[in-house]
Image: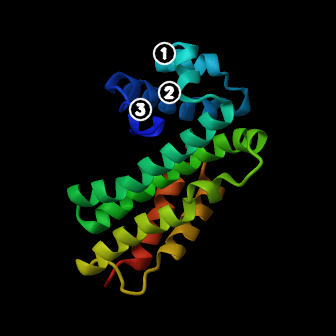
Amino acid sequence: MADASQRRRAPRSDGIHNRDRILEAAARAFATDGPDATLKSIARDAGVGIATLFRHFPTREDLVEEAYSNSLEHLCSAADNLLEKYPALEATRRWMGRYLDYMSQKSGMAETIRTLLTDDIDSRVGSIGRLTGAVTALLEAGQTAGQIRQDARADDVLAALAGIAVVAGRPTQRDQADRLVEYIIEGFRRT
């Protein structure tokens, strides 16, 4: 006889859809309002009731961590998606723009994360490893295509992008951030 965990039904498609909408609404709310974001406003933005939100995320901490992890997953999976659509160098450029968007959102979530979570969320969701994997895929594709220098390293790219996010990460500075990304691209372009 199957135990209780094996008898559980797979999530219904509407449940999965509700969960995704809640995560998207939470990421927006935490990025904009930080720890002042209310669960009621998140549920309303997602188009679900508060009970549905709590069914998926029993605590505020669960919602914050999952919203953060979900945003990171979207960013990292974008590397492969962009490589399917664009040449490696252009895919890398576009991914870097998405990274800057992510960092802007993450900085808005940072206060919420600090307020609610005692453990290091970056360690728990494997941020560095996942980001390094995404950048490595982009660089290797560019190196294989002869567009990116063989000595370009993912950790160097991530450090440079983090610097850009710190000094030019506000939405009003996006033109400057984009110019700085171009300098990075030129720095590792194969000549």
Q: Earlier in the sequence, mark 3 or mark 2?
A: 3
Q: Earlier in the sequence, mark 3 or mark 1?
A: 3
Local packing at callout 3 (Cα closer than 10 Å; few below 14, some 14-19, many 20+) is: few
Q: Quadrant of residue 87?
A: bottom left
Q: Secondary structure at mark 2?
A: helix
Q: Earlier in the sequence, mark 2 or mark 1?
A: 2
Distance between the alpha carbons at the discs numbered 2 and 1: 8 Å
> Badges 2 and 1: C-beta atoms under 8 Å apart?
yes
Residue 177: horizontal and vertical position, in percent? 52, 56
Q: Which residue is mark 2?
A: 22
Residue type at the position of mark 2:
Ile
In terms of depth relative to the viewer, which is nearer, 130 or 160?
A: 130
Which residue occupies the extreme front position in the image? 1
Label disc, if present, on residue 8 of the rendered structure:
3
- Direction from residue 178 to residue 159 in the image, left or right: right
Local packing at callout 1 (Cα closer than 10 Å; few below 14, some 14-19, many 20+) is: some
Q: Which residue is mark 1?
A: 48
Local packing at callout 2 (Cα closer than 10 Å; few below 14, some 14-19, many 20+) is: many
In terms of depth relative to the viewer, which is nearer, 57 or 75?
A: 57
Distance between the alpha carbons at the discs numbered 3 and 1: 23 Å
